[in-house]
Amino acid sequence: MKPEIAWAEAMKFENRPEPYRFFDKLRKTPVARVADGIYAVTGYWELLALAHDPRVSSNMSRSPLAAKSPAAAEPPPEAEHMKAYGRLPSMIVSDPPDHDRARRQAMRHFGPPHTPHLIPSMAPDIERLCNELLEKATGKTRIDVVDEYGYLVPVTVICKVLGVPLEDEKAFHGWIFDFMAGLDLGPEAATEEGKVRAEKGKESTAALTEYLHGLVEGYVRKPGEGLLSKLVNDGGPDGPMEPKEAASNAMLLLIAGHDSTVNTISHCVLTLLRNPGSIELLRRRPGLIPRAIEEVLRLQSAVQFFPSRSATADIEVGGTVIPKGSAIFLMYGAANRDPSRFPDPDKFDPERRDNEHFGWGSGIHTCFGGPLARLEVNIALEVFLRRVENPRLVVDPPPYRRNQIFRGPQHLLIDYDRIRD
Ligand code: HEM
């Protein structure tokens, strides 16, 4: 199978539950040209090299995906959509020194050394919330792990961390849904339905952007609780962040700060239920839970790739030359199953030891929120395993979300006997 075909198949919605067989085909050429000006990297070692190569830029405005094609009257729909995400230079679509400065400014109010207690201090609230959600499931024998459990934990937590009012969740939930559904890098983007989704995604992205600008401007006028307010008011060594830049980072933090965590919680439950005996193993040895979560992230990476990168020079890697100006997709989900790095790569092994996977990325853009996400997923899974008796999958594979980058089930129905006290 040619790389272009394998790529298009992996990106198709019908293959969202299982893109991996196409990634295996793609990995026969670990650095492959998959479309005009786009290279996909599926080999572990090649990806590792590129993630740390300063000739690879994350500045979205340099990517051919964001540039308006001079030959075309209109840019391709996916380009327009990525521009919507990249037009505001949040840290994830920036290079040093801007990236490093923005990350320092945000980290100052999120983790060590300046704010070491914030994340650990959230543990009791997270546990209480998980328990409350399961209380609501008492007296029933079926829940949707996404809508009734996994989503509500990280969204509540990130709102508190950022200072986004939780009562606004009803509005931003819909906007983020449209944004995600409209951001399509596969062949379906060119269909009529794909164009409608892209258009709706753009409108909702504009609404979300406006909302977050308003919130940040409000904090400039009247400081309040949370990271966003501190970002625009605190005078650390780098000074406060410009409100416009703070709003784009707010969008990044709000979306990245819950979506991948939801998908990871769902994939943890799905993976355990697909592998008989693993629930009993983790109940017997709860100390294995953190390792099992890392193994789920390796197998079902919630961020499959991030399409901001491009080559600032001709780069030779894995026997291929990526020409200057090309888009580079570091396919974390694919490299995480490279047999040259992970023995028996498709197997779920909750006791796997040597497991340095790319589920959190690699290099300077490695996930900012990993410690918070790990805490949330660990508590959510631990409470689930302790209280949900005899859980069973109702539909396998479950229905998936459209998005290829942020991949996870749309719903995950499970049946169970009862919720234990
Ligand atoms: C299980 C949940 C999560 C997963 C799997 C995940 C995964 C990732 C990955 C793979 C990247 C690298 C993207 C790239 O290569 O450009 C990333 C970046 C990022 N993540 Fe996460 N993430 C999770 C949760 C979170 C949370 C809870 C937050 C915020 C509190 C967060 C904030 C960010 C930010 C701001 C970046 C960009 C960092 C930079 O550009 O320096 N993530 N994440």
Image (cartoon, grey):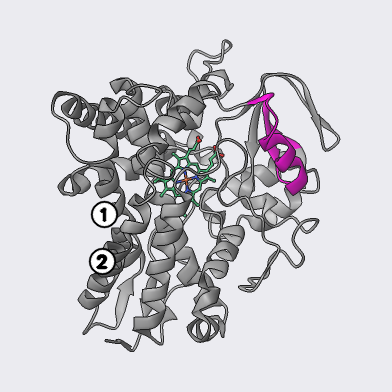
Is residue 33 depicted above or below 73 in this figure? below
Within the magenta stretch, is there residue 33? Answer: yes
* Place of residue 386 in the rendered image (x, y in percent of width and height, measured from the top left): 38, 82
Query: In the visual, does 302 lie left or right of 230?
Result: right
The magenta segment: 32-56
Identify the secondary structure beneath mark 1: helix
Nearer to us in this view, 356 or 303: 356
Is residue 393 depicted above or below 299 in this figure? below
Identify the secondary structure beneath mark 2: helix
Q: Residue furthest right?
A: 319
Question: Which of the image's four quarters has the C terminus?
Answer: bottom left
Q: Is disc 2 surrounded by few (<14), some (14 to 19) or many (20+) residues within 10 Å?
A: some
Residue with the mark numbered 2: 129
Residue for point 71% across, 35% down: 50
Residue for point 49% across, 79% down: 286
Query: In the visual, does 366 lie left or right of 219?
Result: right
Residue kind at label 2, given as amino acid type: Leu
Label placed on residue 156: 1
Label placed on residue 240: none
Query: In the visual, does 241 lie left or right of 397?
Result: left
Q: Is residue 171 visible?
A: yes
* Place of residue 143 in the rendered image (x, y in percent of width and height, measured from the top left): 31, 74
Query: In the visual, does 301 lie left or right of 391?
Result: right
In contact (CB < 8 Å): disc 2 and disc 1: yes
* Place of residue 10 in the rendered image (x, y in percent of width and height, measured from the top left): 62, 49
